[in-house]
Image (cartoon, rainbow, N blue to C red):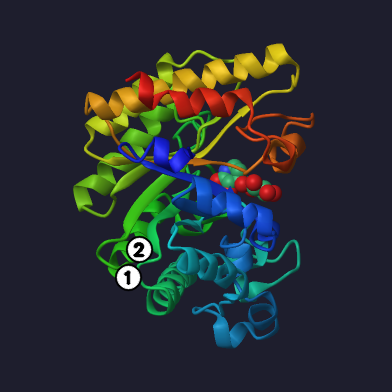
Amino acid sequence: MSLKKAYEAYFKMGTSVSERNLSTEEAKRELVLHYNSITAENGMKPMFCLDWKANTENPEKYNSEPALSFESARKYLDFAKETGISLRGHTLVWHNQTPAWFFKKDYSREENAPLADREVMLARLEAYIKGVLGFVQTEYPGVIYAWDVVNEAIEETEENGWRKSLWYQTVGDDFVLQAFRFARKYAAEDVKLFYNDYCTFVPKKREKITELILKPLLKEGVIDGMGMQTHLILKHNELSEYETSLNTFGALGLEIHVTELDIHNADPSEEGEMALALMYEQLFGLYVKVKEEKTANLTSVTFWGMKDDESWLTGFRKEQSYPLLFGENYALKRAYEAVIAVPSKN
Ligand code: XIL
């Protein structure tokens, strides 16, 4: 049995991968066995696709057309191509892991340098999207099936709902729309365009995402899907708002991807592992249910990390986390057994 086999009638099964995973035989075996989708955990983000040296040393030349670097991206694309595993592109436009100089006049690395103006940033945005999509589609046609075009633009605690990121500050509140227009313009026809965010089950955030992003983009016909990151916490194991979000986004006619699934769990005891297994069972029960009842077109579910000891959560939550289906050396956890068993119960 494997994850992708167990769920083949429902949706793709994926995981994020690090550069280290791609150079470890054991990890590669696990990838081929369990998954039919992968996402680069970091290596295709703007900080990796932008050529730091060229841009900052020669700002005049690259002012409106940033120099790009695909050394990192190629590793993921090569692996996906060799193995026939599909790749989710993550991510084109994000406030994090994009160098601050990218938003500055003349790509300045001085902390207090002025920001570039709207016109320049729109040109950089278009050139970046055109360049990345062009490279991937020319050299690796068909490998990437979906892109997180914009990541995390909504902050529900802000009065107008928009995160005051450097994209927002330089371009304005239409930066998401502009990004999707450019992505639609340069993406191959069969490449699906996603908006991706975390805490999409928080009612106020769900509402802001729907009103400020999804509806306007649907109206223009430039978005295909909603990415629900799904970084959950075992202590908050109530899934009803999560279910409402799946159904709300589903009802808009969007494809849904669960893009970054993990459940923070600081308790590795038998009790903790059982509780984790139960929550995963409920979650995958929900995924199967929305598919069977056709209330949400969920087509891909991606875990954020291959095994507990590599999870980003231990750093992020500042305590050891055991959030995934696999433990050290890819030992199958109770959560794995629970997830694998869900489809046969339906
Ligand atoms: C995280 C990675 O897992 C870490 O290795 C990195 O240090 C920071 O980014 N939302 C996202 C992901 O969209 O890209 C983030 O990944 C986790 C939160």
Q: Up-down: is 116 above or below 280? A: below
- The residue drawn where x is 67% and y is 53% is 26
Provide residue 10's location: percent of width, then percent of height: 32, 36
Residue at the right extreme of this rendering: 319
Please say whether residue 27 is visible from this viewpoint: yes
Write the residue at 53% across / 71% down.
78
Q: Amino acid at mark 1?
A: Tyr
Q: Secondary structure at mark 2?
A: helix
CA–CA distance between discs 1 and 2? 5 Å
Question: Which quadrant of the structure image shows residue 331?
Answer: top right
Question: Does residue 50 appear left or right of residue 266 in this picture?
Answer: left
| Circle 1: element type | helix
Task: Tell me if residue 30 comes above or below residue 263 in the rendering.
Answer: below
Quadrant location of residue 42? Answer: bottom right
Q: Give the camera-side residue of 114 and 125.
A: 125
Q: Is the residue at mark 1 in contact range of ligand 1, meaning its CB lies under 8 Å from it? A: no
- Give the vertical position of 183 relative to 261 (above or below): below
Q: Nearer the viewer, residue 146 or 303?
A: 303
Q: How many marks?
A: 2
Question: What is the x, y in percent for residue 176?
Answer: 40, 52
Residue 160 placement, left or right of 310: left
Q: Residue at x 68, y 63 (%)?
A: 23
**How many other residues sit within 10 Å of disc 1, few (<14), some (14-19) or many (≥20)?**
some
Q: What numbered label is drawn on residue 183?
A: 2
Residue 159, horizontal then vertical, whole percent? 48, 31
- How far across and down, in percent of the image, does residue 164 sit? 55, 45
Residue located at (63% from left, 64% from top): 47
Compared with 272, 41 (above or below) is below
Q: Which mark is residue 186?
A: 1
What's the residue type where badge 2 is placed?
A: Ala
The foreground one among 233 and 183 is: 233
